[in-house]
Image: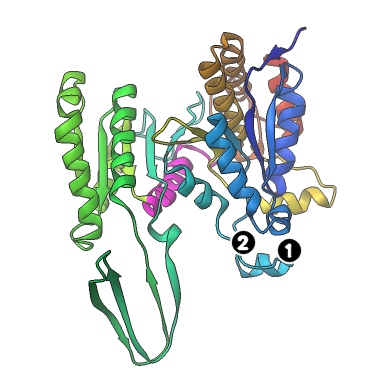
Amino acid sequence: MEKIKMVTPLVEMDGDEMTRILWQWIKDILICPFVELKTEYYDLGLKNRDLTDDKVTVDSAIATKKYGVAVKCATITPNAQRVEEYSLKKMYKSPNGTIRAMLDGTVFRAPIIVDGITPYIPTWKKPIVIARHAYGDIYKAVDGKAGVGSATLCYTDTNGEKVEKKVFDFADGGVVMAMHNTDKSIESFARACFNYALDMKLPLWFSTKDTISKVYDGNFKAIFERVYNEEYKEKFESAGIEYMYTLIDDVVARIVRSEGGIVWACKNYDGDVMSDMVATAYGSLAMMTSVLVSPDGVYEYEAAHGTVTRHYYKYIKGEETSTNPVATIFAWSGALRKRGELDGSSELIDFANRLEKATIDTIESGEMTGDLLSMFKKEGVKAQKLSSKEFLEAIAKRI
């Protein structure tokens, strides 16, 4: 069979631990037998990030801007224990945070729905899409230890005028942090959310905690309201969908009682946490698509979960693992489909669709990784646990 040819390369960002192993298997078993794969490769594994002083992460984001589509493996964000384990020069920042800040995009995360896997919240009949702002807040924060003394927040304008606010008088030790966001990035976030909701014909709910963070979160609320009223109100009314702003604790209560079918827009940290909650409630963190969309139409597809450290340590001992690769498969299929759309390649689009269908068909036929066994219930189908590689091979037979 002649392989499908690609016109423009994808930016390929390799990662860490068990997901790095799955990454190579997915290419070897599911993609390269069918596609003449063209990528510009960047090794974002922790050792190479340390070797390059994290320049490789910046280079991968620049390449993504150049080519327009990237696919990223899960990576380690090092803590103190990882610094010691890998003998790192320093505690590097999150590569996802670096890339997202450079692309200034919005992350959309949606569950992969499979017949036979019922969400833990049984009222959820339709997907809940988390739209996560991917710039600033705690991910670009400056923080540090404080001793006895006073902490202040100081802003200096271009004329040298200063505005200073007292943060806290420390009688003993503590910690202090300052974070920021920009009006431009918030506006881009708002437009991305409104456009996505219109494209999907889904209502959009946006939540912050402006009753507590009256200026910071209040600015998010005000910008969303202005952009909606000036640019999207008539479009939403014509489409028969709603835009609603409310407090984040109120949305949590509403979401649990809903049937789904909603785009839930969240600030950076809220979206990080809530996307994991939603993914788990639908079945598994490994059953969640994730795509970063920048204001200028750049796309970066990734798995929404971590590097699966526990399975990796089993793997390097020679033990067989049953790690779920579905989110990583869908990162590849999403990137290939978008590359096909931008290059006008119907063959590449068709392959991406077939890859996703083969993956879902494999699970619905009863062949799956161990994390899905306990939650799979389908009349007339007996669930069978496969190793990671066996699962990929079962998918390949159905493409």
Crowding near the residue tagged with mark 1, few <14, some 14–19, many ≥20 C-alpha atoms within 10 Å? few
> Going by the picture, which residue comes out furthest to the right?
318
Q: Residue at x 28, y 69 (%)?
A: 156
Q: Residue 124's x, y, as percent?
A: 36, 33
Q: Is residue 363 above or below residue 269?
A: above
The picture quadrant where one finds residue 109 is: top left
Q: Residue 100's x, y, as percent?
A: 48, 46
Q: Are marks 1 and 2 in contact (CB under 8 Å)?
A: yes
Q: Residue at x 26, y 34 (%)?
A: 204
Amino acid on which disc 1 is placed:
Tyr
Q: Residue 19's x, y, as percent?
A: 68, 43
Q: Is residue 320 above or below residue 77?
A: above
Is residue 370 toward the left or the right of residue 122 in the image? right
- Quadrant of the frame with the C terminus: top right
Question: Which residue range is magenta in the image?
Answer: 268-286
Residue that label 1 marks? 86
